[in-house]
């Protein structure tokens, strides 16, 4: 009984966070007249033939919930989130297109052109490039200025 009660509470907290994050992302995209590009992860669960511990971690990860709330909030604001195939986006150099090598931790380095970057940032840049090559005219990267704090919070900007 206690496990069931706490499980429901955890799910409720996860939905609340997903909704708030989705709302923030859609609000930023709307404010800066931008697009939202997400990884198409529909087949992620069906492609998993790994250990029980990995499958348990995957089931606890709420990627679909996040995608749903981002898409929902985007639709409420009058635009559609786009889904792109994420294959090799975090392992391809955004500068020259060659394969990136792991430099330890989250950092990847290109042995060809010397590019270095965080694997999630590399994946985001490559998703944007992939989306902009889909024949979408006039797509520009529209982000907050470096000295602007998009969250509206006070304090030091890193």
Image: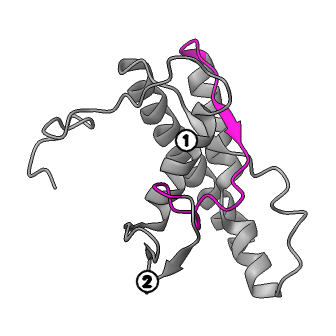
Residue range of the region highlighted in magenta in the rendering: 76-96
Residue 109, visible in the rendered structure: yes
- Quick one: SS at disc 1? helix
Quadrant holding the N terminus = bottom right
Q: Is residue 91 above or below residue 70?
A: below
Residue placed under numbered mark 1 in the picture = 129
Could you tell me which residue is drawn at 70 percent across and 37 percent down?
Answer: 83
Quadrant holding the C terminus = bottom left
Quarter of the figure with residue 132: top right
| SS majority, magenta | loop
Magenta-drawn stretch contains 40: no
Q: Give whichever of 149, 155 is nearer the camera.
A: 149
Residue placed under numbered mark 2 in the picture = 105
Q: Is residue 145 above or below residue 42?
A: above
Seen in the image, is 47 located left or right of residue 9?
A: right
Give percent across and percent down for residue 92.
58, 63
| Colour mode of the rendering | one colour
Q: CA distance from mark 2 to mark 1?
A: 25 Å
Quarter of the figure with residue 152: top left
| Marks 2 & 1, CB-CB < 8 Å contact | no
Could you tell me which residue is drawn at 48 percent across and 58 percent down?
Answer: 122
Mark 2 burial class by Cα count in 10 Å: few <14, some 14-19, many 20+ = few
Q: Is residue 74 above or below residue 54?
A: above
Could you tell me which residue is drawn at 39 percent across and 28 percent down?
Answer: 28
Residue 70, visible in the rendered structure: no
């Amino acid at each position: 009984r206690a496990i069931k009660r706490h499980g429901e509470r955890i799910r409720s907290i996860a939905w609340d966070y997903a909704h708030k994050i989705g709302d923030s992302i859609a609000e930023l995209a709307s404010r800066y007249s931008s697009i939202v590009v997400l990884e198409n992860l529909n087949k992620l669960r069906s492609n998993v033939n790994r250990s029980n511990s990995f499958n348990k971690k995957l089931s606890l990860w709420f990627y679909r919930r996040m995608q749903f709330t981002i898409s929902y909030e985007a639709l409420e604001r009058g635009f559609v989130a786009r889904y792109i195939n994420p294959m090799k986006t975090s392992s391809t150099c955004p500068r020259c297109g060659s394969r990136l090598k792991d430099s330890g931790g989250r950092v990847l380095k290109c042995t060809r052109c010397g590019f270095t970057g965080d694997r999630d940032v590399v994946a985001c840049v490559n998703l944007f490039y992939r989306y902009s090559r889909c024949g979408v005219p006039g797509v520009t990267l529209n982000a907050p200025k470096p000295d602007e704090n998009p969250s509206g919070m006070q304090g030091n900007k890193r």
